[in-house]
Image (cartoon, grey):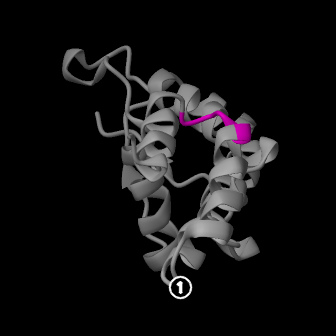
Amino acid sequence: MSDPRQEFLKAIEADPYDLQARKVFADWLDEYGDDQDADLAAVQRAWTKEKQDAIVWLTAYAADLRCDWDEDRQQGMTYDELIEAATDHVKDGQGYCLPFDTPDRVYEDNDEFWRNFELATGEEVAKERKVPFFRCAC
């Protein structure tokens, strides 16, 4: 007999954006889980369509960040690298050298970037920190 918890975790790992699987898993945890599963259930319920869309947008945005002038910086970034850089900026206000295709895009997408960052991470960013923090590493 299979373990339902492991089956849910495998399904979520196979398709992290399957909101239905996450919600059903959260309900299952409420019914069959122990006291420590309340946090895990809350995490599963925190996945909303808006959060999913924000993560997809940020992932694509990170992959597109590249520098046309530097051969070593033409592969873009990962979602995790982008979130780490933005989180560091929010904490200490320091710019972070990241590759990017053109500085204009960073400024054009600034509002959308921070809106998606807040949705994806669940962290509210102070207005004074919602500025383009990328600078060319070239």
Relative placement, left or right, of 72 versus 12 is: left
Q: In which quadrant is the C terminus drawn?
A: top left
Residue that carries the numbered disc 1 in the rendered image: 35
Which residue is found at the position 31% from the left and 19% from the top? 75
Q: Is 47 placed above or below 49 here?
A: below
Q: Residue furthest front?
A: 1
**60 in magenta:** no
Which quadrant holds the N terminus?
top left
Q: Which residues are magenta?
A: 16-20
Give whichever of 58, 39 is nearer the camera: 39
Kind of element beneath mark 1: loop
Q: Position of residue 54 (x, y in %)?
A: 70, 42
Picture layout, residue 127 above or below residue 16: below
Q: Is residue 134 above or below residue 20?
A: below
Residue drawn at x 71%, y 60% as measured from the top left: 27
Percent coordinates x, y for residue 48 in the rendering: 77, 49
Q: What x and y, as percent, mark residue 91? A: 47, 77
Query: Taking the image as drawn, is residue 118 in sight?
Result: no
Check the image and report above or below for 131 versus 108.
Answer: below
